[in-house]
Amino acid sequence: MLSRRGMPVLSAGLLAGWIVAGGVAPVSTLPATAAIDDSKVVMVRDSCTPSFNIFFGDPTICQQTDGKVDIFAFLDYLGKHLNHPLWRFDPQSFNLPAGKHVELQNLGGEFHTWTEVANFGGGIIPELNFGAPTVPECGSPGNLAPESIKNVYLDYQDVENGATAGTSALPAGSHKFMCCIHPWMQTVVQVNRGGTSAVAPMPSHAHASPSRH
């Protein structure tokens, strides 16, 4: 629950008071943009509603109008399952041939990141980590690591390029990606072996760093 314009101060008491047990609602769907031939689309999804903005006192947290999950239902479900299935990357695993790049489409209403990590773990909001430590690739609690090709920022309706398979940023092998805000959002990318001499990386859109962490 972070936007590039700022992150609300999340107190453990505020979240813990509502994380108990709950239910789930249907996912909000925004049509995905067709991918060009040399890309693999990863859809970044959530189903937040304006109730998130009211609860946290920040009008920039959820910017979509067609979400289905009320903040209290979200926190109740999160407390029972330690994740929410409507906050996810699609697909959650895939093969990526050398020369193809990842295209990231934020179809949800919140800010997310696409961050490569050595091991899955906690993000920068301790109350959403359920005891897991913040992984170093994300930054530190309350502080997001700078944006890079390995740590792509995704604002509302953003479409961004991730790394190209077969380059130094995404060599052959298995790669783990997660959201540093909602750490259960995870995908494993298997890069197929192939020649790399003619592969050029795709540029990611430049973003300013979040103004407040």
Image: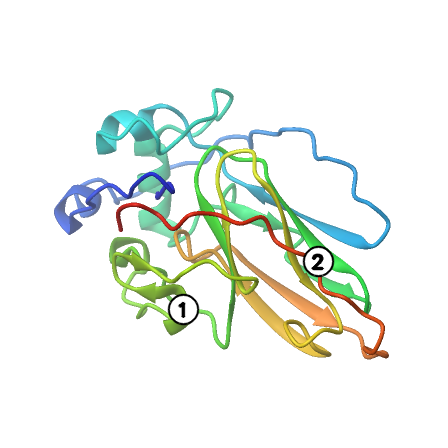
- Give, as a three-letter code, the residue at label 2: Met
Badge 2 or badge 1: first in the primary sequence: 1
Residue 196 drawn at (x, y percent): 81, 77
- Give, as a three-letter code, the residue at label 1: Gly
- Residue drawn at x 61%, y 53% is 204
Pointer 1 residue: 121
Is 46 situated left or right of 170 in this image? left
Q: Is mark 2 on a helix, strand or loop?
A: loop
Residue 109 drawn at (x, y percent): 47, 32
Is 20 situated left or right of 139 in this image? left
Give the distance between the C-alpha atoms of the residues marked 2 and 1, in whole angstroms: 28 Å
Q: Nearer the viewer, residue 90 or 157?
A: 157
Q: Is mark 1 on a helix, strand or loop?
A: loop
Residue 172 drawn at (x, y percent): 73, 79
Residue 81 drawn at (x, y percent): 39, 52
Residue 195, numbered label = none
Whether label 2 touches label 1, CB < 8 Å: no
Pointer 2 residue: 202
Q: Nearer the viewer, mark 2 or mark 1?
A: 2
Q: Which of 78 and 88 is in front in this view?
A: 88
The crowd level at tag 2 (other Cα within 10 Å; few <14, some 14-19, many 20+) is many
Q: Tell me: residue 103, above or below residue 31.
A: below
Q: Locate the N terminus and report the quarter of the image it occupies.
A: top left
- Residue drawn at x 46%, y 35% is 24
Q: Tell me: residue 179, above or below residue 31.
A: below
Q: Quadrant of residue 36?
A: top right
